Amino acid sequence: MKIIAVTACAIGLAHTYMAGAALKKAAKELGVEIKVETQGSMGIRDKITKQELQEAHVLIQAADIAILEPERFKNIPILKVQTSKVIRKAKEIIQQAIDLQKS
Protein backbone atom coordinates (compact mmCIF):
# COMPACT_ATOMS: atom_id res chain seq x y z
CA MET A 1 0.00 0.00 0.00
CA LYS A 2 1.44 3.33 -1.09
CA ILE A 3 -0.13 6.57 0.06
CA ILE A 4 0.73 10.07 -1.06
CA ALA A 5 -0.30 13.14 0.88
CA VAL A 6 -0.40 16.89 0.44
CA THR A 7 -0.57 19.15 3.48
CA ALA A 8 -1.39 22.86 3.36
CA CYS A 9 -2.80 25.34 5.86
CA ALA A 10 -3.95 28.94 5.51
CA ILE A 11 -0.75 30.49 6.85
CA GLY A 12 1.53 27.77 5.50
CA LEU A 13 3.48 27.29 8.67
CA ALA A 14 2.82 25.15 11.71
CA HIS A 15 -0.22 23.07 10.73
CA THR A 16 1.20 22.24 7.30
CA TYR A 17 4.33 20.70 8.77
CA MET A 18 2.70 19.25 11.90
CA ALA A 19 0.16 17.40 9.75
CA GLY A 20 2.94 16.06 7.53
CA ALA A 21 4.93 14.83 10.53
CA ALA A 22 1.84 13.20 12.06
CA LEU A 23 1.08 11.34 8.83
CA LYS A 24 4.65 10.08 8.52
CA LYS A 25 4.69 8.85 12.11
CA ALA A 26 1.30 7.13 11.83
CA ALA A 27 2.19 5.49 8.51
CA LYS A 28 5.40 4.11 9.99
CA GLU A 29 3.54 2.72 12.99
CA LEU A 30 0.96 1.09 10.70
CA GLY A 31 3.55 -0.27 8.27
CA VAL A 32 2.28 1.82 5.34
CA GLU A 33 4.48 3.59 2.81
CA ILE A 34 3.77 7.32 2.52
CA LYS A 35 5.21 10.33 0.69
CA VAL A 36 4.20 13.73 2.05
CA GLU A 37 4.36 16.90 -0.02
CA THR A 38 4.03 20.14 1.95
CA GLN A 39 2.66 23.32 0.43
CA GLY A 40 3.60 26.00 2.91
CA SER A 41 5.03 29.47 3.10
CA MET A 42 8.18 28.16 1.39
CA GLY A 43 6.21 26.82 -1.60
CA ILE A 44 5.99 23.16 -2.54
CA ARG A 45 8.47 20.99 -0.64
CA ASP A 46 9.16 17.30 -1.29
CA LYS A 47 7.04 17.45 -4.44
CA ILE A 48 5.42 14.17 -5.40
CA THR A 49 7.10 12.83 -8.52
CA LYS A 50 5.31 11.39 -11.54
CA GLN A 51 6.54 7.92 -10.61
CA GLU A 52 5.31 8.27 -7.02
CA LEU A 53 1.97 9.44 -8.35
CA GLN A 54 1.69 6.44 -10.69
CA GLU A 55 2.55 4.01 -7.88
CA ALA A 56 0.20 5.55 -5.31
CA HIS A 57 -3.05 3.90 -4.31
CA VAL A 58 -4.65 6.93 -2.62
CA LEU A 59 -4.05 10.62 -1.83
CA ILE A 60 -4.65 12.20 1.55
CA GLN A 61 -5.32 15.89 0.95
CA ALA A 62 -4.86 17.44 4.39
CA ALA A 63 -5.53 21.03 3.49
CA ASP A 64 -7.39 24.04 4.82
CA ILE A 65 -6.93 25.91 1.53
CA ALA A 66 -6.88 25.03 -2.15
CA ILE A 67 -3.75 23.07 -3.04
CA LEU A 68 -1.40 23.93 -5.88
CA GLU A 69 -1.48 21.83 -9.05
CA PRO A 70 -4.51 19.71 -8.08
CA GLU A 71 -4.84 18.38 -11.63
CA ARG A 72 -1.95 16.00 -10.88
CA PHE A 73 -4.28 13.94 -8.72
CA LYS A 74 -7.30 13.59 -11.00
CA ASN A 75 -6.94 9.82 -11.51
CA ILE A 76 -6.46 8.74 -7.90
CA PRO A 77 -8.89 8.29 -4.99
CA ILE A 78 -8.69 11.33 -2.69
CA LEU A 79 -9.45 11.59 1.02
CA LYS A 80 -9.90 15.26 1.94
CA VAL A 81 -9.45 16.30 5.57
CA GLN A 82 -8.48 19.35 7.58
CA THR A 83 -4.93 19.62 8.88
CA SER A 84 -6.12 19.88 12.49
CA LYS A 85 -7.89 16.52 12.23
CA VAL A 86 -4.75 14.89 10.83
CA ILE A 87 -2.67 16.29 13.68
CA ARG A 88 -5.10 14.81 16.25
CA LYS A 89 -6.04 11.54 14.53
CA ALA A 90 -3.40 10.63 11.96
CA LYS A 91 -3.74 6.85 12.42
CA GLU A 92 -7.49 7.09 11.89
CA ILE A 93 -6.94 9.13 8.71
CA ILE A 94 -4.41 6.60 7.37
CA GLN A 95 -6.93 3.81 8.02
CA GLN A 96 -9.65 5.77 6.23
CA ALA A 97 -7.32 6.14 3.24
CA ILE A 98 -6.66 2.40 3.22
CA ASP A 99 -10.40 1.71 3.37
CA LEU A 100 -11.04 4.21 0.55
CA GLN A 101 -8.56 2.43 -1.68
CA LYS A 102 -10.24 -0.92 -1.00
CA SER A 103 -13.69 0.33 -2.01
Image (cartoon, rainbow, N blue to C red):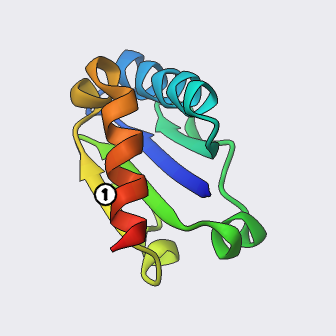
Counting other residues with Cα less than 10 Å from the Cα at mark 1, is it few (<14), some (14-19), or many (20 or more)? some
Q: Nearer the viewer, residue 95 or 21?
A: 95
Where, by quadrant of the figure, is residue 54 drawn?
bottom right
Q: How many marks?
A: 1
- The quadrant holding residue 14 is top left
* Residue beneath disc 1: 79
Percent x, y of residue 50: 72, 72
Q: Looking at the rendering, which quadrant does residue 88 occupy?
A: top left
In the rendered image, the vertical position of residue 46 relative to residue 25, given as above or below: below
Considering every residue shown, the one lying at the far right of the view is: 51
User: Going by the image, does 4 lie left or right of 9?
Assistant: right
Against 85, residue 48 (above or below) is: below
What amino acid is found at the position of numbered circle 1 in the picture? Leu
Left or right of 96: which side holds 39?
A: right
Identify the residue shown where x is 58% and y is 42%. Answer: 36
- In what quadrant of the picture does the N terminus appear? bottom right
- Provide residue 68's location: percent of width, then percent of height: 43, 59
Element under disc 1: strand
Instruction: Say which residue appears at 23% left-offset and 24% top-offset.
Output: 84
Decide if residue 86 is on the left or right side of residue 18: left
Closer to the camera in the image, 92 or 24: 92
What residue lies at 33% left-to-right and 74% top-to-bottom?
103
Q: Position of residue 10 (x, y in %)?
A: 26, 33
* Vertical relation: 26 (above or below) 59: above
Q: Position of residue 46 (x, y in %)?
A: 69, 43
- Horizontal relation, residue 35 to residue 9: left or right: right
Q: Residue at x 58, y 44 (%)?
A: 37
